[in-house]
Amino acid sequence: MAFLDIHDLTKAYGDKVVLDRLDLSAEEGEFISLLGPSGCGKTTALRVIAGFLHPDRGTVAVNGELITNLPAYRRNIGMVFQSYALFPHMTVGQNIAFGLEQRRFSRKEITKAVGDALDLVRLSGFASRRPSELSGGQQQRVALARALVFKPRLLLLDESLSALDKKLRVQMQLELRQIQKEVGVTAIFVTHDHEEALTMSDRVAVMRNGRIVQFDTPTSVYRAPADSFVAESLGEANFLHGVVESRFKDGFVLDLGDGRSLKVRSDNPVPLGATCTVAIRPEDIDLAPGGSEAADLIGHVRSIAFAGNTTLFVVDVLGRELRVRRPNTANTKNGLAVGEAVALAWGPSAALLLLDQGGH
Amino acid sequence: MTDHSLQWLWRVCALLVAVVLLAPILIVIPMSFTASSTLAFPPEGFSLRWYEELVTLPQWTLRIPVSIQTALATAVLASLLGTTAALGMTRGKFPGRGLLTVLFMAPLVVPIIDLAVGDYFVWALGWQLGPVSFGGGLAGTVPGLVLAHTVLAFPFPFITVSTALTTVDRTLELAAAGLGANPWTTFRRITFPLIRTGVLTGAVFAFLTSWDEVVVASFLSSSRVSTVPVQIFNELRQSYDPAAAAISTVLLAASVVLVGLLALIPALGRRASGRSAALELAPKATAAVTEVLSGNGGAAAAAH
């Protein structure tokens, strides 16, 4: 049995089903992200785990102990809110001490633990400040220290970084993950930002309509998405539909229906004649001017958008639009122009067969 | 007419209105220092003898403690009930909440004489229905006065605390629960400190409501136990005793001091809680009361 074991969780508000028989598990010390668009139930799931909401059905167990019916204040779970929810009428030190006071620690132990927690989040010397005197990033760290100081068995983070600006957010992602590893606490992180989920997590649970669509390592969900929803949730993707024409040693050839075909490397024993969809990440496609024998497809450049470290090309391939993203380095020659004929090429492992062929 | 002279006209009008409003309030101050033995304006001479009477004559020395006790107990009881009701109305989700809120504001709009008669029947005479009896025997007692005044004062803490509660972020309460605080601790350590200004403001208004109340108090007074305002009324009906002016001046001073304290609450809040919500609360709570007092009590209450 896993350290955190969530089974069959269901929650509905009237006709609206927010959690639909959700199963989730986490090993001790793991960092799990719940990724999904707003309204997919990720925050509701977190609130059920925290004990702020009672599920209509299903169970939550931590370390073998069933906590579904335990009130929030008896669960010993740390939570960092999106708005941080620091107590405005208390100092930073009092905020952090609050959880320890509830656990009847002595004055001396509290002072020491608060000091250690402030050191951990690199805010030593801030104990007597008011939350309102701190920057967003500092408040974030206080919230983290407050949630960790009483050694919770689980750390829940609700979109905790989304209020920060981009630069600070990236820095806090690394810092948060480092602190989590240092403390060794199991963490569940709710986010709608796929980069954040991929960067930070041991495993990512992609959610839709109150269910988990795919639950795997960042590489797997990115490189072997279950369906087009997962593929798009984790970044940009081009989708191509076709019929399996023939098989070769470690893959098959997909007939795209307009006289073109492409090779897909896959272990999946898809039967001949089956309809399936492949996803191709824009950064996996190579562009070369003119036609070429080695090209997988040939098309015309429709638009070019410079985006700093990358350039986004939209290429028209016989009425189908493909997005291609090429890195910009000092040596990149920007030889392509709108309207020009280009050859698109990618390695056989770039075309990702979507495992679950439903939902198109 | 030029803009300039128009400006002056407005100023004169404002001044006239101010005089009309303030004259009856301020006239008691010089009259209370008169040396003659009847009330008259302008006062004759200067003397503190009427203030001396306040602390020596039994009709005053007996009334002042009753008034203070009644007003203090009313403030405490009304704040307690008002806070509880406000919590229930803002946090609870049950049918009939709007109706109940209007009911809680009713003492502001119900004719005070109705309340006085009702209070008299309940607290002085009491109900008897078979073996069940309720109230009665409380005429001429401080508890009787307190119970009657609490009904009158209740809407004030109810309004100020309701207003305060709407500014409290519910996530803070969830956060406290997540940190291990049970509901009572969460209220004591998080919610209450954040609505304290609202509670205090409500308590001051409740105190003032009882402090200068005549109608209900005169129904529940006896010759032994009565409040200062009732005594003033009785004295003035019998004679133009300048002591009435002296005690009125004292009441006025007490009210001014209390309202002044109310203005100080934000400053206290700033020291105690940084730039928290409490800071903006006192003026907000006061504004809520003013809004309700300015007429549409029921409508404003329902909106909260």
Image (cartoon, rainbow, N blue to C red):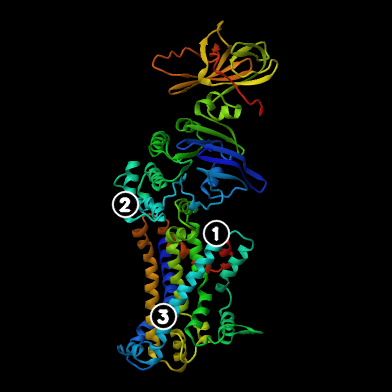
> Does B55 sit left or right of A315 as displayed?
left
Q: Which mark is residue B68?
A: 3
Secondary structure category for the residue under label 3: helix
N-term mark: 1 or 3: 3
Where is residue A196? Give x, y as percent: 47, 33
Q: Mark 2 is on which residue type?
A: Thr
Where is residue B21? Give x, y as percent: 44, 76
Secondary structure category for the residue under label 1: helix
Quadrant that contains the C terminus of chain B: bottom right
The residue lying toward the viewer, choosing from A21 and A234, is A21
Tell me, yes or no, whether dots 1 and 3 are on the same chain: yes
Image height of A8 relative to B121, above or below:
above
Tell me, yes or no, whether dots 3 and 2 are on the same chain: no
Q: Mark 3 is on which residue type?
A: Ile
Q: Looking at the image, is mark 3 or mark 2 nearer the viewer? A: 2
Image height of B199 relative to A199, above or below:
below
Residue beneath the point at 59% across and 85% down = B126
The residue lying toward the viewer, choosing from A58 and A230, is A58
> Does A6 sit left or right of B15 as displayed?
right
The answer for how far apart the CA atoms under marks 1 and 2 are is: 35 Å
Considering every residue shown, the one lying at the far top of the view is A293
- The residue that mark 2 highlights is A111
Q: Mark 1 is on which residue type?
A: Arg
**Is residue B157 visible in this depiction of the protein?**
yes
**Badge 3: few (under 14), some or many (20 or more) residues near its Cα, within 10 Å?**
some
- The residue that mark 1 highlights is B91
> Does B174 sit left or right of B248 as displayed?
right
The answer for how far apart the CA atoms under marks 1 and 3 are is: 34 Å
Secondary structure category for the residue under label 2: helix
Residue B4's quadrant in the figure?
bottom left
**Badge 2: few (under 14), some or many (20 or more) residues near its Cα, within 10 Å?**
some
